[in-house]
Amino acid sequence: MPNTLITHSNHILRIQLNRPQKKNALTPAMYDSLREAIERADDDNSIHVITLTGSGDSFCAGNDLNSFLEDPGSDAAARFIKAIAKARAPIVAAVNGVAVGVGLTMLLHCDLVYAAEDAKFNFAFIDLGLLPEAASSYLLPRMLGNAGAAELLMLGEAFSAEKARDCGIVNQVVAADALEELAQSKAEQLAAKPPEALRQTKMLLRRGNAKAVEETIALELSLIGERLVSAEVRGIMQAFFARRGKG
């Protein structure tokens, strides 16, 4: 079964990450599938809304570190980040579990985000010697102020769905067994709206930050590229895999 399940019905393109045994950690191939689905939605006027969710006990645990180290020069993640940041179609996310790293930063580019009450969130970049991505270093200070953004990005601590809601990352927190129905109902509500007006409303909402987001993504990616070949990051990664091997 593919690691990314994509279906199209009733003007809704549904994307489900389907690698539960790895907590839906993203490989380059999965990044490509996500990007292609977003680009398809943007080019297809019959698609009014995108929904995005995970499988098993996780939404997305970030990058697959094995793939990350084997091919640090892959630009699949960068292309996905640029695509979701520029997506024209509204995106409804259902966070069914763990959301870490890019599994969390991608939510900043979704339009409606709903989370299960037991979902856990963590930006997690700092402990890997890495940097914020997907313009999170720009967007979070504007959402939370510098102190709030520093707490999440510098301490790198896990936080609850309720805190994610209080931060403005999540719209609503619900029981796990009610999540899928809620997200689907909201997607159907959006899909029933006049589609051109819906896309233009999204454009207007994001227009003020669009140039800064694009510039920040480019700067973050450049700096992350430097970090990936640094002795600090390579040492952290080697220690991580050594510990996992002993476990």
Image (tube, grey):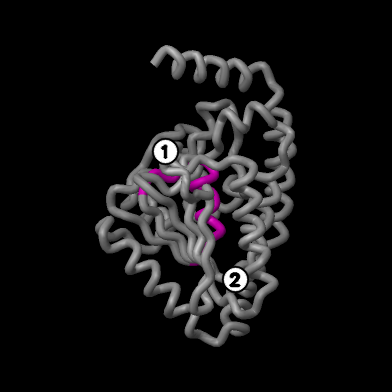
Q: Position of residue 133 (x, y in %)?
A: 61, 43
Label 2 packing within 10 angstroms: few (<14), some (14-19), many (20+): many
Type of amino acid under label 1: Gln
Left or right of residue 101, residue 226 in this image = right
Q: Residue at x 31, y 52 (%)?
A: 162
Q: Residue at x 43, y 61 (%)?
A: 113
Q: Residue at x 50, y 19 (%)?
A: 240
Residue range highlighted in magenta: 97-111
Identify the mark at residue 21; answer none if there is no mark. 1
Residue 104 inside the magenta-drawn segment: yes
Type of amino acid under label 2: Ala
The answer to which of marks 1 and 2 sits earlier in the sequence is 1
Q: Nearer the viewer, residue 60 or 121?
A: 60
Q: CA distance from mark 1 to mark 2?
A: 30 Å
Rendered view: 53 above or below 127: below
Q: Position of residue 181 (x, y in %)?
A: 33, 68
Q: Quadrant of residue 128?
A: top right
- Pick the quarter of the image with the C terminus: top left
Q: Nearer the viewer, mark 1 or mark 2?
A: 1
Secondary structure at badge 1 equals helix
Secondary structure at badge 2 equals loop
* Residue receiving disc 2: 89
